[in-house]
Amino acid sequence: MLASERELPVSGGPGKRTYVREMFTAIAPTYDRLNRIISLRFDQRWRRSAVRRLGWERHPAGVYLDLCAGTLDFGATLARQPGFAGRVVGADFVPAMLRLGRRKAARVAPVTADALELPFPDASFDGAMSQFGLMFFSDRAQALREMIRVLAPGGRLAIAVWNSLEHTPAYAAEVALLERTAGPAAADAVRAPFCLGDRDELEKLFTECGAEDVTITTQQGLARFPTIRSMVEAELRSWLPVRGITLSEDRIQQILEEAEEALSTFRTGNGTVLFDSPAHIVAAVKPKKAN
Ligand SMILES: C[S@@+](CC[C@H](N)C(=O)[O-])C[C@H]1O[C@@H](n2cnc3c(N)ncnc32)[C@H](O)[C@@H]1O
């Protein structure tokens, strides 16, 4: 049996919450570096686009929530906007992630908090944002309702999620490679972050949770890796192990060899890998009057 054919530990509920926390605690030391390797300068486009949709200019001295703040890059992007005079609370349930971002911007305060039970009173924020976190929640509707609860009436939400795998062809090719060489559990682990790509489902989720004026903008972005090997190795040696999947060294070497052919379309003239990696930015408003 391939190691990757083992069952993933949990599929939902409180068990998944503990599992996701452990997974991001394990990945924290390499996350920041990985993030930069993955996106180099390009991730700025997703962040800037989401910050624009927050409409913070209406309350430049306000208090803003960055949920699933990770290493605080998204909150720091808001804090550094010319004219921003407010504060950002960067909330995440993995302290090790928050610690890595401590010195990124003076106006960003890290707070350890679980998205499903936010430790903030009702209506305490002028706006709330989150980048690439919603996909990992065991109960997405509960997390969205919590975000809306802590927003002031009329306050805006801006949330970024990855578009689907079919719009991210390099990862689709990697998933197909893993399906063939490492089994369905390994392929599913790489598929997971792309699970909220369907715009209709996304809109329905926000509307059902009580948000108004929901708009979804698809923001193009490019991801770049130094080589095919570094891209696939990041999944095999970092992401899969934190998802409970450990492959043998022989299997890793076999997959890395096959990846050179399977992903060759995305290799540029100088050997780097460059591919489309679009994200949806969902903007919405908390109703002024309770529904
Ligand atoms: C992919 S990272 C995104 C980090 C950051 N927003 C970025 O764009 O670089 C997802 C983050 O969500 C956090 N997270 C996942 N589930 C959470 C929960 N229930 N409560 C708080 N944070 C959570 C993880 O700890 C992790 O830091």
Image (cartoon, rainbow, N blue to C red):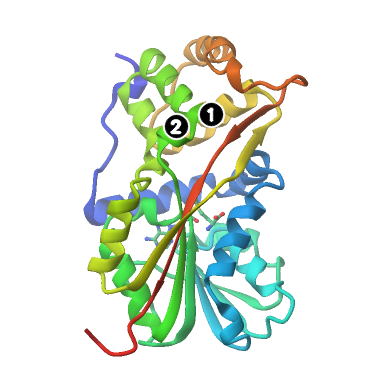
Where residue 135 appears, as percent x and y from the top left, is 38, 51
Q: Nearer the viewer, residue 213 or 175?
A: 213
Residue 241 in sight here? no
Identify the mark at residue 237; answer none if there is no mark: 1
The quadrant of the image that shows the C terminus is: bottom left
Residue 225 in sight here? yes
Residue appearing at x 47%, y 74% in the figure: 128
The quadrant of the image that shows the N terminus is: top left
Where residue 97 appears, as percent x and y from the top left, is 56, 57
Where residue 269 appears, as percent x and y from the top left, is 75, 19
Residue appearing at x 44%, y 17% in the figure: 177
Q: Residue furthest right?
A: 270
Q: Label 1 neighbourhood size at 10 Å, few (<14), some (14-19), many (20+)?
A: some
Identify the mark at residue 184; answer none if there is no mark: none
Residue appearing at x 39%, y 56% in the figure: 134
**Residue 81 as seen in the image, left or right of residue 110:** right
Q: Secondary structure at mark 1?
A: helix
Where residue 158 appears, as percent x and y from the top left, is 47, 67
> The residue under label 1 is which amino acid type?
Arg
Q: Secondary structure at mark 2?
A: helix
Q: Which residue is mark 2?
A: 240
**Residue 86 as seen in the image, left or right of residue 116:** right
**Residue 180 as seen in the image, left or right of residue 264:** left
The residue at label 1 has a CB less than 8 Å from ligand 1: no
Number of numbered discs present? 2
Tag 2 near tag 1, CB within 8 Å: yes
Q: CA distance from mark 2 to mark 1?
A: 6 Å
> The residue under label 2 is which amino acid type?
Leu
Q: Is residue 3 above or below residue 64?
A: above
Q: Nearer the viewer, residue 34 or 95?
A: 34
Q: Is residue 283 above or below residue 34?
A: below
- Which quarter of the picture shows residue 105? bottom right
